[in-house]
């Protein structure tokens, strides 16, 4: 599994970017949000994208994100029944990750329905399935004075990779960091494992 791919921009358009990494060109599908960030760079500049690899019978497709936050929102979206990677990319092209979080937290079905290809049922399902996850994530940010810590991000990624749910991992880390703000990544992971 890839975490990120970095290299020079070989080709860029609003739908995808080709990153040349030591002579191998990776074609990575991107949202307009990521395109806006990447387009600040020129052809030949170095760029780093966090990636998700969608494996299907007929293809392995890479989706790239300029921030871990955008990738996290993408992963939440594709966890919803009926929302595939391309639909999630369409949503993140219409709304920034922060706007999407606000939309879900406030239950604003109208904003989601305004995204091309999202009907009332899918919009409602996204709101129902993700409302608690978004609330938990935003509570964590508020507890950390609106600045997500690097320890929190790294420990959360590790716990999710170990097979624990995002929600359970966030809850454990939130408590740990609240009680001990100066805890290191390794210790946070060890302590969180004991709590789950």
Image (tube, rainbow, N blue to C red):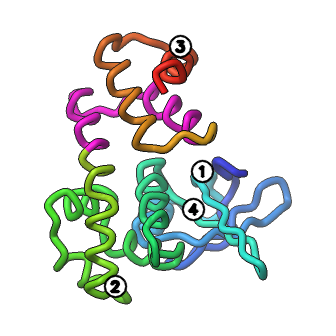
Read off the residue under disc 2: 118
Whole-number angstrom distance, CA of label 2 to CA of label 1:
30 Å
| In this rendering, position of residue 9 left or right of residue 67 | right
Mark 4 touches mark 2? (CB < 8 Å): no
Q: Name the residue rendered at 51%, 58% in the picture.
A: 65
Magenta span includes 156: yes
| Image: magenta residue range | 136-160
Residue 14 spot, x, y in % from top left: 50, 78
For disc 1, the neighbor class at 10 Å (few under 14, some 14 to 19, many from 20) is some
Read off the residue under disc 3: 187
Residue 38 spot, x, y in % from top left: 50, 61
Q: Give the residue furthest to the right.
A: 23
Whole-number angstrom distance, CA of label 2 to CA of label 3:
42 Å
Whole-number angstrom distance, CA of label 4 to CA of label 2:
21 Å
Read off the residue under disc 1: 48
Q: Secondary structure at mark 4?
A: strand
Q: Secondary structure at mark 2?
A: loop
Read off the residue under disc 4: 64
Whole-number angstrom distance, CA of label 1 to CA of label 3:
28 Å
For disc 2, the neighbor class at 10 Å (few under 14, some 14 to 19, many from 20) is some
Residue 132 spot, x, y in % from top left: 27, 51
Q: Secondary structure at mark 1?
A: strand
In terms of depth relative to the viewer, which is nearer, 106 or 93? 106
Counting residues from the start of the chain, the first of labels 4 and 1 encountered is: 1
Counting residues from the start of the chain, the first of labels 3 and 4 encountered is: 4
Q: Name the residue rendered at 42%, 37% in the picture.
A: 168
Q: Secondary structure at mark 3?
A: helix
For disc 4, the neighbor class at 10 Å (few under 14, some 14 to 19, many from 20) is many
Magenta span includes 33: no
Viewer can see residue 150? yes
Counting residues from the start of the chain, the first of labels 2 and 3 encountered is: 2
């Amino acid at each position: 599994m890839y975490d990120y791919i970095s290299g020079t921009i070989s080709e860029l358009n609003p739908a995808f970017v080709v990153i040349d990494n030591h002579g191998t060109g990776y074609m990575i599908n991107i949202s307009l949000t990521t395109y806006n960030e990447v387009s600040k760079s020129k052809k030949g500049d170095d760029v780093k994208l966090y990636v998700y690899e969608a494996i299907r019978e007929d293809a392995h497709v890479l989706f790239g994100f300029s921030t871990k936050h955008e990738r996290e929102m993408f992963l939440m979206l594709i966890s919803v029944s009926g929302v595939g990677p391309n639909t999630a990319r369409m949503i993140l092209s219409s709304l920034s990750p922060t706007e999407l979080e606000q939309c879900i937290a406030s239950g604003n079905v109208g904003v989601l329905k305004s995204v091309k290809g999202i009907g009332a049922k899918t919009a409602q399902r996204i709101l129902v399935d993700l409302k608690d996850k978004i609330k938990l994530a935003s509570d964590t940010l508020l507890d950390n004075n609106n600045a997500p810590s690097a320890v929190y991000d790294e420990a959360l990624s590790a716990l999710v990779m170990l097979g624990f749910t995002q929600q359970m991992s966030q809850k454990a880390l939130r408590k740990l960091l609240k009680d001990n703000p100066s805890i290191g990544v390794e210790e946070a992971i060890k302590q969180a494992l004991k709590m789950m």
